[in-house]
Amino acid sequence: MDMDRNELESKVLDMLEDICADDAVREERDVDLFDAGLLDSLAAIEVFVGIEENFGVEIAPTAVERKEMNTVNKIIDQIAARL
């Protein structure tokens, strides 16, 4: 998939805003989504499913530690590294 960084960021933000049901994800892109109460373990699974559906990128929940995917920017980086 050929996608530039801005398009990737935009799609990830849309997906996370939908899953977290909060537009705060757009403003605080380095805040820990779990500590902030925006993601829990169930929502985290939705993120993995959403990544696969939206980007064709499969990231096994067991393949990454939570601290590697606990902020908007880290999630974007994880996807970008696999595209």
Image (cartoon, helix red, strand yellow):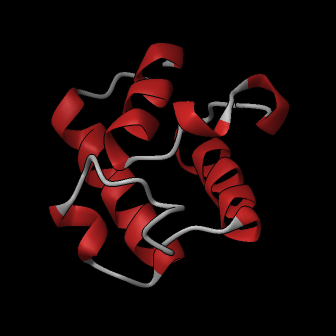
x and y, in percent, of residue 18 in the image = 45, 76
In this view, the residue in front, 46 or 35, is: 35
Residue for point 69% across, 27% down: 64
Q: Is residue 16 left or right of residue 6?
A: right
x and y, in percent, of residue 50 in the image = 61, 55
- Outermost residue, front direction? 35
- Outermost residue, right direction? 62
- Outermost residue, bottom direction? 21
Picture quadrant where residue 51 is located: top right
Residue for point 49% across, 26% down: 78
Depicted 72 relative to depicted 24: above or below = above
x and y, in percent, of residue 75 in the image = 45, 39
Depicted 1 relative to depicted 27: above or below = above
Residue for point 71% across, 31% down: 58
Q: Is residue 49 left or right of residue 81?
A: right
Residue for point 39% across, 26% down: 77
Q: Is residue 77 left or right of residue 64?
A: left
x and y, in percent, of residue 66 in the image = 64, 40
